[in-house]
Amino acid sequence: MILDLDLDLDRETLVVRIEMFLQEVTSPAALDAVFPVAEGWEHCISGQFAEAEGQTIAPVCTKSGMIAIKPTTATRVQYPAVALRPNSELKIISAADYKPLDVTFDDNGTIRRIRWGLDITIQSPAGSTLRVLNVHLKSGCFDDFISFRLWNTDPSTGEPASRACDTLGQQMYPLRKWIEARETAGEAWMIVGDFNRRLDAQPGAIPDEVWIALSGYNADKTGHDRDPRSDIKLFRQPYENMSTCWREFRQPNPSGNPDTYNILPIEFFIYGTRTATMIVPESEKQFPWPNPTPADKMRLSDHCPSSLTISMGSEHRP
């Protein structure tokens, strides 16, 4: 996913630079193959990679003059990462892991790890900042019901779930806590990435359980809020738009498992009111693969890039 960060300083718009947020990267070397530090790129990958390599557990960041690390483990695992375009006026001033998203998963008796979040703070030359949490949440619960009790229970106090919907529900607790902390601090924040959830799948005004879990608002038919937690006003992009990724190969009336058709997006930019003032209107875009062939589905991602433009001018200085 791509954030176009439009730097508006003293009413003079500088060249737009791009921050890439990626969710399925195996190593710094893999990042470097696409975004070479030799050409001025800077990138960071989740500390889960460092943990797997037996290194000090922290995000692995690679800049010009450094050598991108290759993985040594026999099994390749995908992690979230970020890449900053060469000659960017922006700076990555902080990169940290958000480990609570790893609630673990009970896969028929085998406990499997879940991806951590990658917490990045970006700063403009004017001093304004944007806190971005890059996530890849548990797959397998695209639009099925998630129990309301899960996001009010700290998953670290219980046992790993064996159902995908329960695991995704458990991740809502730490994700909401991260949002609450940003709101309390008065920060401009955003969560980007693969939520593995069709937030627009519910009919009419009925919100998705993931949206209820994060916003804290769960109204009944009379408008009464049944959730005792405080409400947090949230926004998302895309909103009620179909995915354009791989549309050439969709069946108009698919039978069987609809999850294979990706008609509704599962990747989003979610943000609060402070960041909402920074969003450039009508700037959200999808970038489907051009002129794809059936063979491309075997070599390209089942997700297509998305972008959103944000203005980080001096008026947004915290």
Image (tube, rainbow, N blue to C red):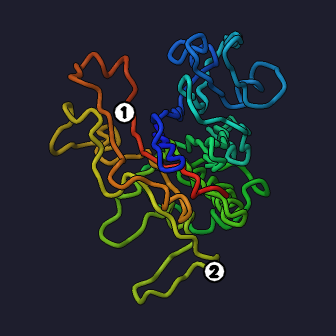
Circle number at residue 304: 1
Where residue 183 appears, as percent x and y from the top left, is: 66, 64
Question: Which sits in the foreground, 311 or 232?
Answer: 311
Secondary structure type for disc 2: loop
Residue drawn at (41%, 40%) of the image: 307
Q: Which residue is mark 2?
A: 228
Q: Is residue 221 above or below residue 304?
A: below
Three-letter code, disc 2: Pro
**Residue 138 in sight in this render:** yes
Residue most extreme to the right: 56
Q: Is 143 left or right of 191, judged from the image as shown?
A: left
Where residue 236 appears, as percent x and y from the top left, is: 44, 57
Q: How far is the residue under mark 1 from the one under mark 2?
A: 37 Å
Image quarter of residue 50: top right
Where residue 154 appears, as percent x and y from the top left, is: 74, 60
Where residue 208 appears, as percent x and y from the top left, is: 44, 63
Secondary structure type for disc 1: loop
Residue drawn at (60%, 50%) of the image: 167
Three-letter code, disc 1: Cys
Residue drawn at (58%, 57%) of the image: 316
Q: Earlier in the sequence, mark 1 or mark 2?
A: 2
Q: Tell me if mark 1 has few (under 14), some (14-19) or many (20+) residues whose alpha carbon lies within 10 angstroms of its own.
A: some
| Quadrant in which the C terminus appears | bottom right
Q: Is residue 215 above or below residue 297?
A: below
Q: Are marks 1 and 2 in contact (CB under 8 Å)?
A: no
